[in-house]
Image (cartoon, rainbow, N blue to C red):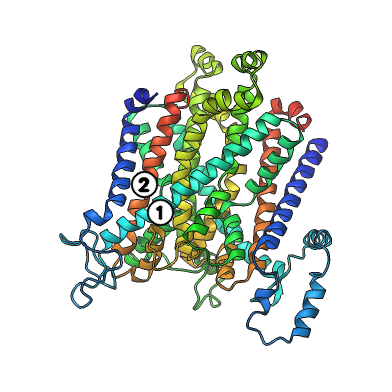
């Protein structure tokens, strides 16, 4: 286990280093130099600009700039935000909890709904229920996540008035609420955005789980279980479903980038104060260090998510152990 | 293959959806008596709900929304098609090079692809759009194409790795056929199916991503109307004129369903085991 973890951690670190390299290359490829936009239109004197340039190391040869950039990122220094005039990491850190709560709730909805739907379909393939659910998941899978958010908001917030329109908590009277009241208020705000993000994910998960279930049901051990005279219930739940859940662990790792991409849109629709909306605002403010910093942070989260999925797989499936760490 | 493809009812439905929507988009000037930006009657035809002479209603500027949706679909489909062509070309080339070389070149390319796949796609695109600032439609196509080929390159590489072990390639090699010829005549035609599947399914994904970017205001810019851009424009009139945002969304959903059905159909007709 230690060796497996060490190898995987090292691979993850290498990927993060490549991501940092990629953002460095993109910044250097972009037109103009990185500071031109920051000083554009500001009354700063040429001497001051030259000073800032020097401090940022822009006079150094390119390979030294690269080493500096990587060293800074490694120390957690993602540069300074132009619009907030403070380190990018400080600004990003404040937004992470909101995005985490949203993405985690969505992931829960995604997996509970997706796995049960897909498993039900796979247990009785080509039945009427299967066909209906296939159509439903395909439709849901094809819906732009932001448009689903807009439609749900129109229906449940604007027309029916069941849910608040935006934000993660009430803007008025929140401070007067008891602790329980605050939690309920936040949950009330969380439901629609999390449902939007979770539903679209669930459609993908259901499609995947259906295929995994179909695969499991055709295995010999399922036939033996039936031949032994076990009830259909036991065959489906104990034998087929449990085995079909293995590949779904991989899906858990894969769902991180999709969730994070979706959160950019869902947060914008619902005015959710998370990282995604922050990045969109940063683009409007031409504050590119925030955007590159967020990309590095989210990539790191994705790499950690994959690492977690690998570890879960290791725990769940002893068969993969000898090969997994020697595969390299 | 075409025969078995058309046997499935779902695939036929998908082809019909894509066909009808594409035809409607191409024929937009013939179908609609209005122009996409034409302000028909600012006094009497503002924010009309759907009715016979304006099936999708009109917007704040009394523009006919069916016309705008048709022209918007044109923009969205063109962007998706060109981005996919770019992405498939790069993906197939990188995949072929990686799969054929199989040494350090393969290792380096695939680690780079791993890194690119680790950045959530929308964030990667936003980085490029933030650094290059306002890009036009051409720029958007380039950005989408350049950030969408990673998956395809892996598929093609895997296909090449399995194909190069097959007997017909060994046979060709032993007959003294050169690498370039093996590549062109033996590997490419056989690796083409996963590429077609990836491209068809990719069309739907790109349409969704472009719509998302345009909704965020960083994709297609005014006065060009793409479907995502229209949903954004209708957002402010959500309570009194919800149809402005709803119809473009429905068209996006139908288009993406169409491409998904066709993509699934192509895959099933090659490998019936999947479903």
Looking at the image, is A10 positioned above or below residue B262? Answer: below
Mark 1 lies on a secondary structure that is: helix
* B59 horizontally vs A278: left or right: left
* A100 horizontally vs B264: left or right: right
Looking at the image, is A290 positioned above or below residue B184? Answer: below
**Residue A249 in sight in this render:** no
Residue at 18% from the left image edge and 75% from the top image edge:
B44
* A308 horizontally vs B74: left or right: right
Residue at 54% from the left image edge and 53% from the top image edge:
B142
Residue at 65% from the left image edge and 22% from the top image edge:
B178
Quadrant of image for the N terminus of chain B:
top left
Tell me whether circle 1 and circle 2 mark residues in contact (CB < 8 Å): yes
Residue B100 spot, x, y in % from top left: 67, 29
Residue that label 1 marks: B76
Q: Which chain carries label 1?
A: B
Count every numbered label the image shows and give the total: 2
Q: How far apart are marks 1 and 2 (CA)?
A: 10 Å
Mark 1 is surrounded, within 10 Å at the Cα level, by few (under 14), some (14 to 19) or many (20 or more) other residues, namely: many
* B257 horizontally vs B86: left or right: left
Residue that label 2 marks: B255
Residue B20, image quadrant? top left
């Amino acid at each position: 286990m230690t060796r497996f973890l060490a190898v995987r951690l090292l691979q993850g670190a290498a990927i993060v280093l490549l991501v940092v390299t990629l953002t460095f290359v993109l910044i250097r490829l972009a037109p103009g130099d990185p500071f031109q936009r920051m000083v554009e239109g500001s009354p700063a004197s040429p001497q001051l600009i030259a000073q800032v340039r020097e401090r940022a190391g822009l006079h150094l040869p390119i390979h030294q700039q690269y080493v500096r950039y990587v060293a800074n990122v490694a120390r957690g220094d993602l540069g300074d935000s132009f619009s907030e005039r403070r380190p990018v990491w400080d600004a990003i850190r404040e937004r992470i909890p909101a995005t985490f709560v949203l993405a985690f709730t969505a992931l829960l909805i995604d997996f509970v709904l997706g796995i049960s739907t897909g498993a039900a379909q796979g247990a009785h393939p080509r039945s009427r229920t299967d066909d209906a659910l296939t159509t439903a998941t395909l439709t849901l899978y094809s819906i732009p996540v932001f448009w689903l958010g807009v439609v749900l908001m129109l229906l449940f917030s604007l027309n029916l008035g069941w849910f608040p329109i935006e934000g993660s908590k009430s803007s008025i009277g929140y401070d007067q609420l008891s602790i329980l009241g605050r939690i309920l208020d936040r949950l009330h705000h969380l439901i629609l955005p999390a449902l939007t993000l979770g539903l679209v994910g669930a459609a993908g998960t259901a499609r995947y789980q259906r295929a995994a279930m179909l695969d499991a049901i055709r295995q010999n051990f399922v036939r033996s279980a039936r031949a032994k005279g076990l009830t259909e219930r036991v065959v489906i739940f104990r034998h087929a479903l449990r085995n079909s859940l293995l590949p779904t662990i991989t899906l858990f790792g894969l769902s991180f980038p999709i969730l994070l991409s979706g959160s950019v849109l869902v947060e914008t629709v619902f005015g959710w104060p998370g990282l995604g909306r922050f990045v969109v605002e940063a683009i409007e403010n031409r504050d590119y260090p925030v955007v590159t910093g967020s990309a590095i942070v989210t990539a790191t989260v994705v790499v950690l998510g994959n690492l977690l999925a690998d570890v879960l797989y290791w725990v769940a499936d002893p068969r993969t152990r000898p090969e997994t760490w020697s595969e390299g | 293959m075409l025969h078995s493809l058309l046997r499935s009812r779902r695939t036929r439905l998908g082809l019909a959806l894509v066909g009808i929507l594409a035809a409607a988009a191409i024929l937009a000037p013939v179908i609609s008596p209005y122009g996409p930006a034409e302000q028909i009657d600012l006094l009497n035809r503002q924010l009309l709900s759907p009715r016979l002479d304006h099936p999708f209603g009109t917007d704040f500027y009394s523009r006919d929304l069916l016309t705008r949706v048709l022209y918007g679909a044109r923009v969205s489909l063109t962007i998706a098609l060109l981005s996919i062509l770019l992405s498939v070309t790069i993906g197939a080339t990188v995949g072929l090079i990686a799969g054929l070389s199989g040494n350090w070149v393969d290792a380096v390319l695939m680690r780079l692809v791993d890194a690119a796949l680790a950045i959530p796609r929308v964030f990667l695109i936003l980085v490029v759009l933030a650094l290059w600032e306002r890009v036009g439609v051409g720029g958007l196509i380039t950005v989408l194409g350049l950030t969408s080929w990673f998956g395809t390159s892996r598929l093609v590489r895997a296909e090449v790795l399995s194909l190069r072990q097959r007997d017909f390639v060994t046979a060709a090699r032993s007959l003294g056929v050169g690498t370039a010829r093996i590549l062109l005549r033996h590997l490419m035609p056989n690796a083409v199916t996963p590429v077609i599947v990836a491209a068809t399914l990719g069309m739907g994904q790109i349409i969704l991503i472009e719509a998302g970017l345009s909704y965020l205001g960083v994709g297609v810019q005014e006065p060009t109307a793409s479907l995502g851009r229209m949903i954004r424009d209708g957002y402010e009139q959500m309570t009194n004129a919800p149809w402005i945002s709803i119809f473009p969304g429905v068209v996006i959903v139908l288009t993406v369903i169409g491409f998904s059905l066709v993509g699934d159909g192509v895959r099933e007709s090659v490998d019936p085991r999947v479903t």
